Amino acid sequence: MCAYSGAIGKIQQQFNTPLALLLSTSLFCLLTISHSAIANESLNFPKPNQPKIITLAAEDSWPPFANQLGQGISHRLIEAAFKQSQIEVNSLVVPYSRALMMAEKGAVDGVFNVTREASTEQRFVFGEMPLFVAKASFYQRKQRSLLAENKWKIPKGSIIGVIKSYEYGDEFPELVKQRQLNIVTVATQQQLINLLLIGRIDAAVMFDLVAQENLQKMGVNDEVIPAFDNHTSNIYLAFSKENPKAILLAKALDQGLSALKANGQYQLLLSAK
């Protein structure tokens, strides 16, 4: 039985034809259904203070920024920045190449620690503010010097080790071409260092803080040393172009990082062990 029967009764007194009665009954039924639908729909909206959750792919072998345990500088900065907008971060720890692929396909909302350069700007959405700035250098074995003043003087045909899918600056492809470098690609920093130690490569490109962390852990920081700079990168959280809210998330991150810098938390999070 349709609701509002009392109201229908009043209409029945005003309309004597069956058609009028039918129309009035249908009208009140539609109003009842519409009211119920609106009420149910409103229950599905998140409460204003309810935190939103995003899923990010975090690389597993770039300490002190991000490690296999889902810890590091990047994790701290990103979580604290999004907390300003009541956004909760769920991090999936995977190899960097897989993290990029997941973000590109839209399996996650974003990916940690991406250098903003020509190649990555085509693939991802970036905010205005980097997480931090990181410098990368060519590293060599102390007993086997490259005998070069800078990267543009590296002997032609040298064998250089890099990490799969890492970005090494817009100049790197031209450097490889000009100096006819042979590139060996591996998955981890430890593999790069081991290849240097056994003489399988002439040099490796590593980000300085990451190199220091790994060399110290392996106990070979006196055997493998920096030779000269490769580049300095602005490191970002890159967002998936498959996510329609990517631009909004990038703005939320920018606002969060700005707030952390304004209240002094940023430097504390950046320098904490």
Image: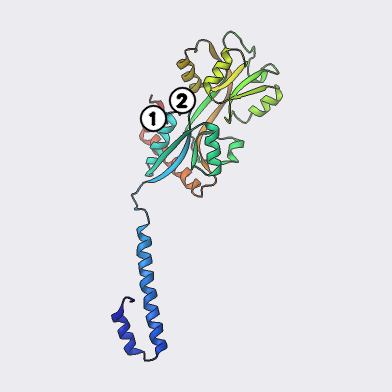
How far from the left and from the top, in percent, is residue 34?
39, 70
Task: Please tell me which of labels 2 and 1 falls first in the chain.
Answer: 2
The amino acid type of the residue labelled 2 equals Pro
The answer to whether one can see residue 258 in this image is no
Q: Is residue 88 left or right of residue 202?
A: left
Which quadrant is the N terminus positioned in?
A: bottom left
**Residue assigned mark 1:** 269
Indicate how the structure is coloured in the image. rainbow
In the rendered view, tell whether residue 120 sits above or below residue 176.
below
Q: Is residue 55 left or right of residue 227?
A: left
Asked which secondary structure carries label 2, the reply is: loop
Q: Residues within 10 Å of mark 1 (few under 14, many from 20)?
A: some
Residue 63: mark in rendering? 2
Q: Residue at x 61, y 9 (%)?
A: 144
Outermost residue toward the front in this view = 1
Q: Residues within 10 Å of mark 2 (few under 14, many from 20)?
A: many
In the rendered view, tell whether residue 177 sits above or below residue 8.
above
Q: Quadrant of residue 71?
A: top left
In the rendered view, tell whether residue 5 sits above or below residue 40.
below
Which one is in front in this view, the residue at disc 2 or the one at disc 1? 2
How far from the left and from the top, in percent, is residue 214?
48, 19
How far from the left and from the top, in percent, is residue 193?
54, 17
